[in-house]
Amino acid sequence: MERPGSTAEERPAVDVTHRTAGAPAARRAADPLAGYRAADFPWYGLDEGWTGRRWLGQVGTGQRAADTGTPDYGTLGHGDEPARGPETRDTRRFAVVVTVARRDVRRSADDTGTLEATSASSAAWLAGSGLLAATWPGNLDRTLRQNWLDQQSALAWDLADDLEGPAWSTLTLPVNGLPQPFRYRESEHGWVLAGEAPGVLIGAYGRSVSAYGVGFTTVADLGAYDGR
């Protein structure tokens, strides 16, 4: 993985921008599940041990042609949804699962370079940046918030690029009922983990929900996440 803002040859296979364009965007606006159904990989969420609310997050593409309509990653949420604005005292309880497609090295959409294959570090970066976006301090104004996000995002990027480093520990959790090792870390903002699952890479982040008690499973019915 390379740091954001690098050249085309160095860009990561996945970025955190939610890209939409043309007909795929229109379909997603009409049907929130359309982007999820367009995926060529299985989606993962928390297993039946989670009895609380479920909600749709976002789907997005990496550095590929955005009008293909095929996502590279997406999120499914559990518990309280993200705050609509700054909160002086954030008491939300949530866990969000990030599913990332396995992608090989390939040419960039503008054909100016190559894209790295996705990896557990890709999932860790998306989960880490998602946690930051969900938990930024409510007492910061817009300018200070951006500075804070820039600093924390750079740190999250470095941490995701070093999953074997001392900031991470190993946590074994069930995936479709079978034990699977994940890399796990905690911070003042919450927790982040990343690992592998059949067909995909999994990241997750949360706060006020114990990561030690969660399990993951393929989602058979995306309608369970559609609160319409």
Image (cartoon, rainbow, N blue to C red):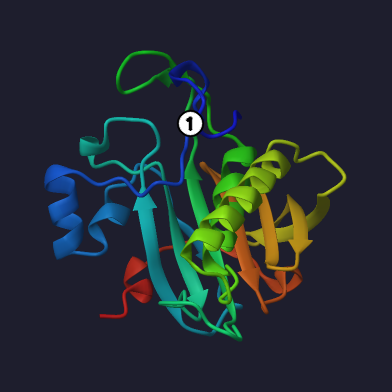
Horizontal side, residue 124 vs residue 102: left or right: right
Q: Position of residue 23 (x, y in %)?
A: 12, 46
- Image height of 224 relative to 179, above or below: below
Secondary structure of the residue carrying numbered label 1: loop
Count every numbered label the image shows and give the total.
1
- Image height of 168 relative to 83, above or below: above
Task: Please state which of residues 123 and 149 is positioned toward the viewer in this rendering.
Answer: 149
Horizontal side, residue 148 vs residue 33: left or right: right
Q: Residue at x 73, y 51 (%)?
A: 182
Q: In the displayed image of the protein, which residue is found farthest to the top? A: 112
Q: Position of residue 160 (x, y in %)?
A: 68, 42
Q: Position of residue 53 (x, y in %)?
A: 46, 83
- Image height of 34 relative to 96, above or below: above
Where the C terminus falls, by quadrant? bottom left
Q: Position of residue 106 (x, y in %)?
A: 42, 19
> Which of the 4 quarters of the picture holds residue 171?
bottom right
Q: Residue at x 53, y 67 (%)?
A: 134
Residue 30 seen in render: yes
Q: Residue at x 29, y 41 (%)?
A: 70
Residue 217 seen in render: no
Where the N terminus falls, by quadrant? top right
The amino acid on which the numbered mark 1 sits, given as a three-letter code, is Ala
Crowd tier of the residue under label 1, counting other residues whose Cα lies within 10 Å: few below 14, some 14–19, many 20 or above: many
Which residue is identified by label 1? 13
Task: Please state which of residues 103 and 113 is positioned toward the viewer in this rendering.
Answer: 113
Q: Residue at x 31, y 80 (%)?
A: 227
